Image (tube, rainbow, N blue to C red):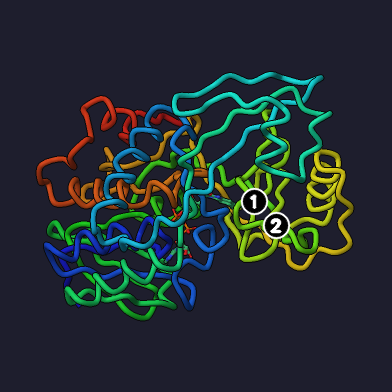
C-alpha cells in the first residue's frame, strides 16, 4: 500500500489530478462514497462558459478549453455541442455589460433565439456563442480509464479519517486500512477544510453554498436541443435544455455544512416562479429536483498549491461554480505542482499567485 501520490476525493477535480499524476507515478485515489462524482461533480449544469468567474478562473477555463480540444485525458468528446449562453436584461432591470466574447442582441433577436422568452419583458441580451455542453460522465470515465491504464488504484468506500507524517511520508487511514505516500492531494470538495485539518493544515475558510435545480417539461413539440442556456442578468434564475427537459435553477447560494445536499422545496418554488415570470410558461410538474454544493474561499479563486504549514499536502479545492469546466486545467496544474515539474503551459506566474493557498489567511 505504498504510493507516490494519494489523492483524496474522486470528484471531477480529484479524478483529473489522479489521471494526470498516474502517468508519472503510482497513484491511489480515495473516495468515501461508493462511486466517484456522487457530490457536486454529479450535480452540475455541465456548461463551459469562458466569461464565467474572475480572471484566475477565466485563465484556467482557457487552458481547459485547449486541453479539451486536444486529445487529452478528459476525453475528446467531453466538450459537446456549442449551445451558447444568453444573459438577458429586463426592461426595468440592470442592463449588465458585455464580457469579452459576448455580443448584444435586441429583445426580438433574443426571443427568436429562445422562443420561450417574452420579448416585451426584455431590454436586450448578451450572447456568448461558444459556450458548450460538457459530458461530465465522459470526462469521469476517461479520467478513470487513464488512471487504471497506468496502474493507479481507485478505492471507493474509503473515507479518510486520520493522517500522520513520519520520515517524510504520510500515512493515510480510514480507521481500518492505511496507505502511505510522500505527497497527498486534498481534492475533498466541500470537506477540504476538514480533510486539511487531519493533515495539520490551517482551515482556508471554505464556504459550501447550496445550489438547487429542477427538471421541468418543455412545451410539447419544441426543438429544445437548439436552445441556448438563459441566465437573467441579475443571476436570479437560469434554465437550459437537459436531455429532453429543461433544467431550471434559482441560482441560490445558501451557506451549508458539508453534506449530501438536497433541494429545498422553497428554492424550487422560487425557481419555477422566476422561470414562469420570464417565459410566461406554466409549469405543471417538476420531474426531478436536486442540489449540490459550490465551495468558495473569500476571493472566489480556487486553491491549487502546497500548504504552507503541512509538508507534502497539496490543495485542489474551492472550485466554486467552475470546477467541471476547469477540471482539465486544475488537475493538470495540481499534478505539475505535486511532481515539482515545469508548470503547465499557460499557467503564468500571476495565475499561480492567484490560486496559491498561501494567499488565504483566515481569522
Ligand atoms: C447546481 C450546480 C450547477 C453547477 N454548474 C456548473 C457548471 O455548469 N460548470 C462548472 O464548471 N461547474 C458547475 N458547478 C460546480 C461544480 O459542480 C463543482 O465546482 C465541482 O464539481 C467541484 O468538484 P470537486 O471534485 O472539487 O468536488 P466534489 O465533486 O464534491 O468531490 C469531492 C469528493 O471528495 C470526497 N471526500 C470528501 N471528504 C472525503 C474523505 N475524508 N475521504 C475520502 N473522500 C472524501 C467526497 O465524497 C466527494 O466525492 C455546479 C455546481 C452545482 C451544485
- Residue 204 marker: none
Q: Earlier in the sequence, mark 1 or mark 2?
A: 1
- Residue that mark 1 sits on: 240
Distance CA(mark 1)–CA(mark 2): 5 Å
Above or below for 50 versus 215: above
Name the residue at 53% across, 57% down.
Answer: 40
Ligand 1 within 8 Å, label 1 CB: no
Name the residue at 81% across, 36% down.
Answer: 118
Name the residue at 67% across, 32% down.
Answer: 109
Above or below for 175 versus 118: below
- Residue that mark 2 sits on: 246
Task: Identify which residue, 216 or 314, lies in the foreground.
Answer: 216
Q: Is 27 displayed left or right of 329 in the figure?
A: left
Whether residues under marks 1 and 2 lie with C-beta atoms below 8 angstroms apart, the answer is yes
Residue 72 in picture, x, y percent from top left: 24, 58
Callout 2 crowding tier (Cα within 10 Å): few <14, some 14–19, many ≥20: many
Q: Is 306 displayed left or right of 38 in the figure?
A: left
Give the total of numbered labels. Answer: 2
Picture quadrant of residue 215: bottom right
Q: Quadrant of the N terminus?
A: bottom left
Residue 243 in picture, x, y percent from top left: 61, 65
Q: Secondary structure at mark 1?
A: strand
Residue 105 in picture, x, y percent from top left: 62, 27
Amino acid at each position: 500500500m505504498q504510493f507516490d501520490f494519494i489523492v483524496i476525493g474522486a470528484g471531477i477535480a480529484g479524478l483529473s489530478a489522479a489521471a494526470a499524476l498516474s502517468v508519472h507515478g503510482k497513484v491511489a485515489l480515495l473516495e468515501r462514497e461508493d462511486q466517484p462524482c456522487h457530490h457536486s461533480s454529479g450535480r452540475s449544469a455541465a456548461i463551459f462558459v469562458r466569461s464565467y468567474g474572475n480572471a484566475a478562473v477565466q485563465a484556467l477555463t482557457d487552458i481547459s478549453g485547449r486541453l479539451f480540444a486536444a486529445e487529452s485525458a478528459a476525453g475528446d468528446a467531453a466538450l459537446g455541442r456549442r449551445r451558447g449562453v444568453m444573459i438577458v436584461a429586463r426592461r426595468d432591470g440592470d442592463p449588465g455589460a458585455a464580457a469579452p466574447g459576448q455580443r448584444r442582441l435586441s429583445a426580438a433577436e433574443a426571443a427568436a433565439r429562445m422562443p420561450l422568452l417574452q420579448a416585451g419583458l426584455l431590454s436586450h441580451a448578451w450572447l456568448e456563442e461558444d459556450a458548450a455542453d460538457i459530458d461530465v460522465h465522459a470526462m469521469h470515465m476517461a479520467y478513470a480509464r487513464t488512471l487504471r491504464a497506468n496502474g493507479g488504484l481507485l478505492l471507493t468506500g474509503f473515507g479518510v479519517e486520520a493522517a500522520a507524517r513520519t520520515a517524510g511520508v504520510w500515512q493515510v487511514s480510514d480507521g481500518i486500512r492505511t496507505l502511505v505516500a510522500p505527497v497527498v492531494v486534498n481534492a475533498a470538495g466541500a470537506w477540504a477544510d476538514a480533510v486539511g485539518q487531519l493533515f495539520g493544515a490551517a482551515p482556508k475558510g471554505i464556504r459550501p453554498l447550496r445550489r438547487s435545480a429542477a427538471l421541468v417539461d418543455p412545451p410539447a413539440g419544441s426543438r429544445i436541443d437548439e436552445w441556448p442556456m438563459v441566465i437573467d442578468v441579475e443571476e436570479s434564475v437560469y434554465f437550459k435544455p437537459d436531455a429532453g427537459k429543461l433544467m431550471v435553477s434559482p441560482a441560490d447560494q445558501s451557506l451549508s455544512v458539508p453534506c449530501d445536499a438536497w433541494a429545498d422545496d422553497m428554492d424550487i418554488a422560487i425557481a419555477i416562479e422566476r422561470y414562469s415570470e420570464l417565459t410566461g410558461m406554466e409549469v405543471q410538474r417538476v420531474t426531478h429536483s436536486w442540489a449540490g454544493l459550490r465551495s468558495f474561499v473569500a476571493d472566489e479563486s480556487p486553491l491549487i498549491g502546497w500548504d504552507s504549514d503541512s509538508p507534502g499536502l497539496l490543495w485542489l479545492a474551492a472550485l466554486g461554480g467552475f470546477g467541471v469546466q476547469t477540471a482539465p486545467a486544475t488537475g493538470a496544474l495540481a499534478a505539475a505542482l505535486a511532481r515539482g515539474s515545469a508548470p503547465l503551459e499557460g499557467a503564468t506566474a500571476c495565475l499561480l499567485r492567484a490560486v496559491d493557498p498561501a494567499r488565504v489567511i483566515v481569522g
